[in-house]
Amino acid sequence: MKIRKHMVLIVGGGTALILIVVALFMLYRFFRTYDRVNEDLDSSMNQLRALQERAPYPSRENVAVTQTNLVILQDYFSNLFTFLREGQIEPVELEAAKFTPLLRDGILRVSKRAQDAGVKLPSLFAMGVERYKMGALPSGADVPRLVLQLKTLEALCDMLIDAKVSEIVSVKRRIFEQGALEPEGAAGGGGRWGSRWGGGGPMPEAAPAEVPAAEAVDPSGLFSTEHYTLEFKCHEKSLWDILDAMAKSKLFGVVTSVSIQNENPLFKLSSTTPAPTAAPAPAAVPAGSAGKGLVAEEIKTQDQRVIAGREFVSVILEVDVYRFLGGEKQEAKP
């Protein structure tokens, strides 16, 4: 009787006990999962902390490979600059008084070569340094670069002469000097070379100096450039020979501009020119008299039929000549 009386309580208590056991089991599983995740998180945090606090030194193997690569790159860099600097013209430390005979010898040498090759030069050819040919003395600090420019212009003139140009009109260089010391008798009387090089007449007054230009040195300090302008007259083939010679020369020259002008433009039929009239039909030739009293039309050769492409042209050639400095300045920057 008592059991039946308390059956509801017994069933309810049993159900509650089962629910409590299931809840405790689920709580245990959640706790174990949380504990495992927390352990993994602590392990990852410890690894991250160890990596952050670790001194970032490379391995010995990487150090050895990097040192080997550095030696290879340095050797390649040294060999490359040795090859590029081979045959290039260098500045020469020289006294200002010795620049005059050096200039005179250079002009005479180029003039002699041009005369032997039949190349016409300007009447007062001065290799782009007119005021020093007239007797001015350069500043001592300017002499090394002047020697460099003079020898480079001489080499460029040799290329023009070897290519058999018809005439060298002018050669120009980059003006960088702040001024020149004018000796007595330099202006108006032809200077010291007036009677020998100027045909006995007075030398013209020097043209006003251009704005001084500093040496164009690359920011890395690996090379510098000098700009030259050559004006000459030649056939088209000679121009191609000049460009080929510059590409083969030990002077590392880069052509920056080529201007070509034909001094003899082709004939153009104007609107005022009367149109050609039709030729009258030839009269009939009596039988038996064919070929008598008739002049055969002259057949022109291929060379005679060429009407363009073989004239003399005026050329203005601008070129930058590179000088590789190597160890003179600073090492290459990344």
Image: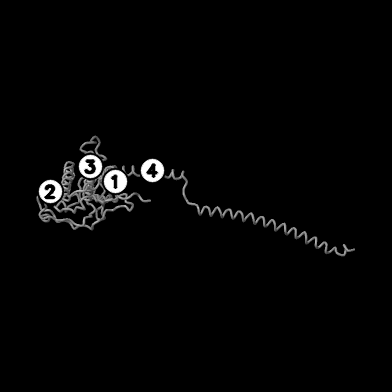
Q: Which amino acid does label 3 sit on?
A: Asp
Mark linked to residue 162? 3
Q: Distance between the residues labelled 1 and 2?
A: 32 Å
Which residue is disc 4 drawn over? 71
Quick one: SS at disc 4?
helix
| Residues at circles 4 and 2 in contact by the CB criterion of under 8 Å | no
Judge whether 139 appears above or below 162 on screen. Answer: below
Earlier-in-chain disc, 2 versus 3: 3
Residue drawn 17% across the image and 41% down it: 116
Please tell me in which quadrant of the rendered image residue 175 appears: bottom left
- Separation of residues labelled 4 and 3 (CA atoms): 43 Å
Q: Nearer the viewer, mark 3 or mark 1?
A: 1
- Comparing marks 4 and 2, which lies closer to the viewer? 4
Question: Does the rendering let one see residue 17?
Answer: yes
Q: The residue under label 2 is which amino acid type?
A: Trp
Residue 196 picture location, percent across and down? 11, 48
* Residue 246: image location, x then y, percent: 28, 44
In the image, residue 177 above or below residue 236: below
Q: Residues within 10 Å of mark 2 (few under 14, many from 20)?
A: some
Q: Which amino acid does label 1 sit on?
A: Phe
The residue closer to the viewer here, 184 or 73, is 73
In the picture provided, is 115 more to the left or to the right than 302? left
Residue matched to label 1: 252
Q: In which quarter of the image is residue 212?
A: bottom left
- Which of discs 2 and 3 lies nearer the camera? The answer is 2
Total marks in image: 4
- Residue 261 seen from this side: no
The crowd level at tag 3 (other Cα within 10 Å; few <14, some 14-19, many 20+) is: some
* Helix, strand or loop status at disc 2: helix
Dot 2 corresponds to which residue? 197
Work out whether mark 3 precedes mark 1 in sequence or the reverse, and give the earlier one: 3
Nearer-the-camera pick, 210 or 263: 210
